[in-house]
Amino acid sequence: MSINQAIKKVEERYAHQPEFVQAVKEVALTIAPLYDAHPEYEKLKIFERLVEPDRVIAFRVNWENDKGEVQVNRGWRVQFCNALGPYKGGLRFHPTVNQSVLKFLGFEQIFKNALTGLPIGGGKGGSDFDPKGKSESEIRRFCYAFMRELHHYISKDMDVPAGDIGVGGREVSYMYAMYKNLTHEYSGVLTGKGVGFGGSLMRTEATGYGAVYFLENMLKAQNESIEGKVVLVSGAGNVSLHAAEKACMLGAKVVTVSDSQGTLYDEKGLDQEKINWLKKQKDQSKPLSEYIEVYGGEWFAGQKPWHIKGDIAIPSATQNEVNEEDAKLMVDNGIKYVVEGANMPLTAEAIDHIRDNRVHYAPGKAANAGGVAVSALEMSQNSVRQYKTFEQIDERLKNIMKNIHDCAAEASETYNQTDNGYVDYMAGSNIVGFKRVADALVAYGFLN
């Protein structure tokens, strides 16, 4: 079966899962040169096997709200591929969570994790539980209830979840407490734990910092520097604010962040004091727009940042936040680099427009791999019962992101995807990630 035939089969079988189909097509269309060069992949049906998860675990989560009323949510864990190591991927608590979203995230996670060069497979999970508006006690009770069901299917050597949207250190700590209570084990089964009881330094900063480290390497490849560049960031969560923070540290001028209510624009640029204020504001679930009263700037209610002029865009809010019209605005407003801080924030049409206009584009599976890389380092620290310093982990993260960049650029060149200096990072990263997983599956035969 050819790649195009495999895509058609996925489209027919999973027409009701658009996010998953989008993720599969993006990978499939870029790995064709590699697939054609390796007949053993076709013989062993590697691609057809990879688009089907090893298993999808679905369960009900009963919990009690502060009024004593029983609530019912749905929970899932998608264990996609463990060819390179234990399943590894976050848990997302958000009302938009469904099987399609988790399958797209889990499929992307296979190749993202492979790109890190660390021994981790791909998985994802979560629930349609909405933490917004819930009390501390309600969130704690939900996390306990969620882990009561999930603990049957995870362990430090089989499946190691982490946090994602709606799941931070607080939620991971609650779930870890329940896991220990049920299993009587103190093991590295969850990452993103608090520092001092198994957690790693720099895990909070890793995804945002890593994206900017990848960006630095992109700029260097074009003989440019981040210093003085105007940066647009979307989102105001963990990834967004730490990407903004690192960009500012390196001399960039970050002028936007955003949330579901609108976009904050500060023409003067953010600095550490302003970023610390934004972190505190978001931690307290207070409106982003209150920034104007403290530091000035403009608030664009109900708008995204892409109508503002800049050099670099780092979309870091959620999947498919950037559509084709947004991509056109980016191009028209001078954006030359797009680095995905979130998972698949650009629609397929937006990606096409960006690439057609030779805007340098870093897909999420490469650019935001820093988070899972440090999660894997946390797993290693748990295994040997030792902790690394912030500086040691930061240096390791820089090296990992440079290696991902260099491998993707080399693959783009090797498979004739580089055009007159324009590096196809999407093709390159997909090829590198896919090849690492495919070669392992070939070695295993047909059992995995």
Image (tube, rainbow, N blue to C red):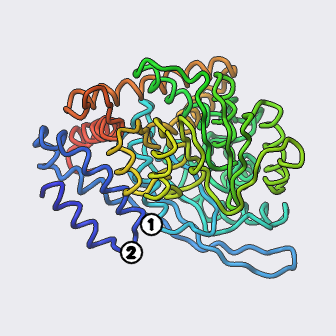
Disc 1 residue crowd, few under 14, some 14–19, many 20+, Cα 10 Å: some
In front: 364, or 184? 364
Where residue 341 appears, as percent x and y from the top left, is: 55, 43
Residue to which mark 1 is pinned: 100
Q: Looking at the image, do the residues carrying marks 1 and 2 touch, with CB atoms under 8 Å apart?
A: yes
Residue sitting at x 69%, y 75%? 62
Tell whether 411 sits left or right of 242: left
Disc 2 residue crowd, few under 14, some 14–19, many 20+, Cα 10 Å: few
Where residue 298 appears, as percent x and y from the top left, is: 76, 49
**Residue 16: which numbered mark, if any?**
2
In front: 320, or 328? 328
Secondary structure at badge 1 equals helix
Q: Amino acid at mark 1?
A: Ser
Secondary structure at badge 2 equals loop
Q: Quadrant of residue 22?
A: bottom left
In front: 300, or 213? 300
Residue sitting at x 69%, y 67%? 130
Q: Amino acid at mark 2?
A: His
Q: On the rendered image, what quadrant is the N terminus found in?
A: bottom left
Residue sitting at x 58%, y 34%? 379
Q: Quadrant of residue 437?
A: top left
